[in-house]
Amino acid sequence: MTAERHSVKFHSTWANEPPTEAEKAKVKSERALMRAVLAGNKVAVEAAIEELPRNGGDINAEGSGGCTALHAAASLTDEDCSLYLCGRLLDHDADLEAENSLNFTPLMTACLAGNPKVVTFFLSKGANINASSRKGKMPLAIAEEAGHQAVVEALQSAL
């Protein structure tokens, strides 16, 4: 039985049998993408995106806390790099409405990070401005609580 959703975790049967080489390659390529995104390394992200299909990898694989590469890209402090990587991931079918373990979508992550360009971009791509986290917080409340006025203004202009 495999883990639910787009998990990077190995099969639960591995307690009794080792992973296959294909399974190892899949997980390795998914982890390479996440590492490249977190490092803000555009060249490595492009290479990892190209490698994913060859290894059966999933662009929506979940890492720590259920975050996808798109969540990670939305959280980067370099806003231009974040915007570029989010665009590339969405070009390759990243899930704009993926939820992490706190039910945060990439839009909410960008709101928390104070990334108005990415917030505006996600909204232009159809991100759900009314999504709510596990604690019932919506993107506008997340941005307000974090004190990100430019993000608040971007969200308000979309309402």
Image (tube, helix red, strand yellow):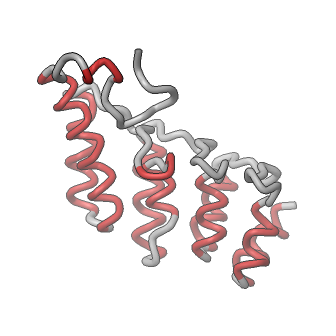
Q: Nearer the viewer, residue 6 or 48?
A: 6
Where does residue 84 sit, x and y in percent of width and height?
Answer: 42, 62
Where does residue 95 sit, x and y in percent of width and height?
Answer: 54, 39
Q: How many marks are shown on the rendered structure?
A: 0
Left or right? Give the position of 41 relative to 112: left
Q: Nearer the viewer, residue 53 or 1?
A: 1
Residue that extends furthest to the left in the rendered view of this protein: 21
Where does residue 79 sit, x and y in percent of width and height?
Answer: 48, 75
- Residue at 29% from the left image edge and 41% from the top image edge: 30
Left or right? Give the position of 143 relative to 72: right
Residue that extends furthest to the front in the rendered view of this protein: 16
Left or right? Give the position of 110 relative to 74: right
- Residue at 78% from the left image edge and 56% from the top image edge: 135
Q: Nearer the viewer, residue 67 or 95?
A: 67
Q: Quadrant of residue 146?
A: bottom right
- Residue at 64% from the left image edge and 48% from the top image edge: 125
Q: Quadrant of the C terminus?
A: bottom right
Above/below status of 107 relative to 59: below
Q: Quadrant of residue 43?
A: bottom left
Q: Quadrant of residue 157?
A: bottom right
Residue that extends furthest to the right in the rendered view of this protein: 159
Above/below status of 45 relative to 142: above
- Residue at 74% from the left image edge and 69% from the top image edge: 142
Q: Quadrant of the N terminus?
A: top left
Where does residue 90 sit, x and y in percent of width and height?
Answer: 48, 45
